[in-house]
Image (cartoon, rainbow, N blue to C red):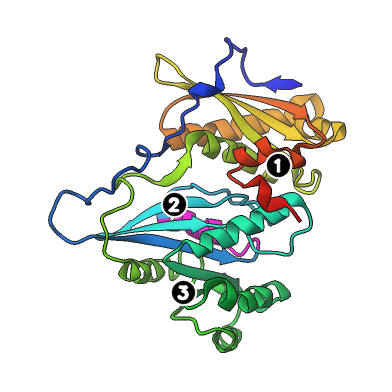
Amino acid sequence: MSQHDETPEGEESRDDLPGAPVGGDLPGAPVGGDGTDAPTSAGYVALIGEPNAGKSTLLNRMVGAKVSIVTHKVQTTRARIRGVAMEGRAQIVFVDTPGLFRPRRRLDRAMVAAAWSGVADADMVVLLVEAHRGITDGVRAILEALPDRLGSKPVALAINKIDKVKSEALLKLTQDLNDAHPFVKTFMISAERGHGAADLKAWLAEQMPKSPWLYPEDQLADLPLRMIAAEMTREKLTLRLHQELPYELTVETESWQERDDGSARVDQMIYVAREGHKGIVLGKGGETIKAVSKAAREELAEFLGRKVHLFLQVKVRPNWLEERERYSEMGLDFKDGNG
């Protein structure tokens, strides 16, 4: 076991971890908006697509804050992450699902099950397709599954990364996709640059059913702070390690201590599957984990608006991919990973 950051000042019980969603309390009775009598609407929008289609980037843009892990690597979103966006009197709860792909192992199967479950519970579904990749085998499989999975539930199409293709190819892809499925609306967007995102958000707001708001107006995500903190560190690891380490690592926030000076002490454990992976995470002279810790600490401090003391440890657990507790920490159902 290895630790990096600052000298520990005692251990904190896991029972003290903050579990409230970011920006507000746990949702209880629906709130009625801003206290006026003007009608409000609220609903859930599931973002689906292949891994790396841009779902997390779009979610963060819609919410106006980074609540979902974004890297150039595929299959980085593991659980359903809900981001809350306001558009006028409408509240849109976006559900960023794991990418839909052909699963090979328990974690893959649990992720795909979480994705389809998020779709089933949504009021509206948005399928993201990468413009430059077009109708891949993965997109074709999703299109074929939509009728059985969703029935008559409305699905909108968002063709993403439109800056990567010429208009002629974009028009043909739009026609081909709409021939394959009766999408209720098609949008051309660039989630990264923001093109078309405002139009998509405004249209989705109009589709939300009349309802009191489901979350407080200032709440950004239905996700415990401890999980957001763990995801931030996992993102930095993914970006830093590139191809050196497979996806067989996970990060858990083991303790969270609020200090009298307003800062927070956060202890996290990085689980890897092999002894050799531990050395990769640490890096020569500990340089890798130092860089990861610094980047994650700075991002978390900016997110919280206060100082953070982050402590990282690395532990080898050869069978963590088969441990029920690890799945619970990731927000996944262990049973969904059964073959």
Residue 61 vs 280, above or below: the answer is below
**Disc on res. 153:** 3
**Percent of width and height locating residue 318:** 82, 35
Label 2 to label 1, Cα distance in Å?
Answer: 26 Å
Q: Secondary structure at mark 1?
A: helix
Q: Secondary structure at mark 3?
A: loop
- Over which residues does the magenta segment extend? 51-62
Number of marks in the image?
A: 3
Say few, some or many: other residues with alpha carbon within 10 Å of mark 1 (under 14 / 14 to 19 / 20 or more): some
Residue that label 2 marks: 83
Q: Quadrant of the N terminus?
A: top right
Residue type highlighted by circle 2: Gly
- Residue at the far top in the pictured view: 9
In front of the other: 20 or 261: 20
In front of the other: 326 or 165: 326
Whichever of labels 2 and 3 marks the residue nearer the N terminus, that label is 2
Residue that label 1 marks: 240
Q: Secondary structure at mark 2?
A: strand
**Of circles 3 and 1, which is in front?**
3
